[in-house]
Amino acid sequence: MQNSEIVLIGGSGKTGGRIADRLAKRGLGFRVASRSSARPFDWEKRADWAATLTGAKRAYVSFQPDLAVSWAADAIGALARTAIDCGLTHIVLLSGRGEEGAQHAEEALKASGIGYTILRASWFCQNFSEGAFAEQVAAGKLALPTGVVKEPFIHTDDIADAAVAALTDASHVDKTYELTGPRALTFCEAVAEIAEACGRDIAYQQISMAEFKEGLAAAGLPKGMIDLLEELFTQVLDGRNSGVANGVAEILGRPAKDFGDYAREAAANGTWQVG
C-alpha cells in the first residue's frame, strides 16, 4: 500500500473515510494522508508533501480548516505543483459552493496544469449527526444564527460516490460538479424533519451572531475558528446556495439522496437517542 495509486488527503474526515471504505470494497489500492498517517501530511509543513505524494497517480483533497481561509488558494496551488513533480496526473478537490476563497483555490488548481475534478458542496446532512450540531440536536434544541435562508443539504455518501467516480473514471477529468441535495430546507425545517424521524420534540432557535460567537468563545474555540464560522454563516448562508443543482445526477447517473431519508436512517441507527 506504500505505492498505492490513490492518496486521500484528509482521508479520515466525513468524506474521506467514506471514500476509503468504497475504494477498499472495490479492491483499489489507496492510502490515507493525515497528520497521524504512515506518511504524515500537514498543510503547514510543505517540505513533507513530496514524501506523502510519491508513488501516487491521483489524489482526493479535502482542505482543512476550510477553503475560505486566506492562505488556502496558495496552499492548493503549491500542492498541485508538488503533485505534478511527484508524477501525479489528477486531483479531485472538495470545494466550497458559493465561497469566494474556494473559487480562488479552484483557480490555483487549474493554473497548475494538473488534471482536476472539482466537487463543489456546501452544508452536509451529516453536520446534524456527526458534526458540530449533533450534541445540541440530541439534547433537544439547536440554536444557530440563521433563519429563513434555505440550503439543499448534501449527503456525504453522495460526495463520496462522486469522488470515487472521479478518481476511477477519466471522463470526469477537467470537470466541475455542483453537488446538492434534491430540495432546499431552512435549518428549522431540517430540525423538524429530524424530530419527526426521531419521534421526539427537537426545537430550533434562531439567535444573533453575537450570541453565537459568545457561545463559541465560552466553549473554548479559538478566535480564528470563530471568525471562520461567522464567515460561513453570513457569506455562504445569504441565499446564494439555495438553488438545487444537478451535479449528483450528472456524475452518478442517479438522483441525490433526500434529507428526509437521511434523517430517518440516522434516527433508526439511534444517532440522536437520549441517554
Image (spheres, grey):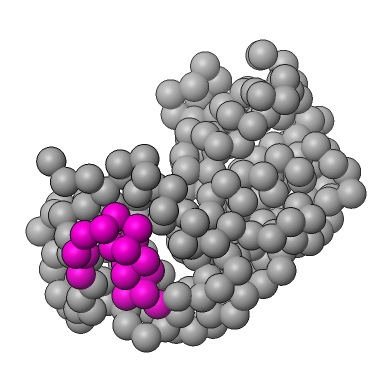
Q: Of all residues shown, which one is farthest toward the left?
A: 218
What residue is at 47 percent from the left and 43 percent from the top?
14
Q: Main secondary structure of the magenta part?
A: helix
| Of 206 and 217, the residue lying toward us | 206
Task: Work out whether residue 162 can be spotted.
Answer: yes
Against 82, residue 73 (above or below) is below
Which residue lies most toward the front here? 199
Q: Residue at x 15, y 75 (%)?
A: 211
In the picture, residue 1 is in which quadrant? top right
Instruction: Give the quarter of the figure containing the C terminus.
Output: top left
Locate residue 20 relative to residue 146 in the image: left or right.
right
Vertical order, 15 against 31 (above or below): below
Identify the magenta region.
Answer: 186-203
| Residue depicted at 27% across the width and 76% down the height | 145
- Say whether residue 148 is left or right of residue 22: left
Q: Is residue 223 magenta?
A: no
Q: Which percent across, then down, holds residue 227?
A: 31, 67
Tell me if residue 82 can be seen. no
Front-most of residues 45 and 18? 18
Relative vertical location of residue 80 with respect to residue 124 in this rendering, above or below: above
Coordinates of residue 28 in the picture (x, y in percent): 73, 23
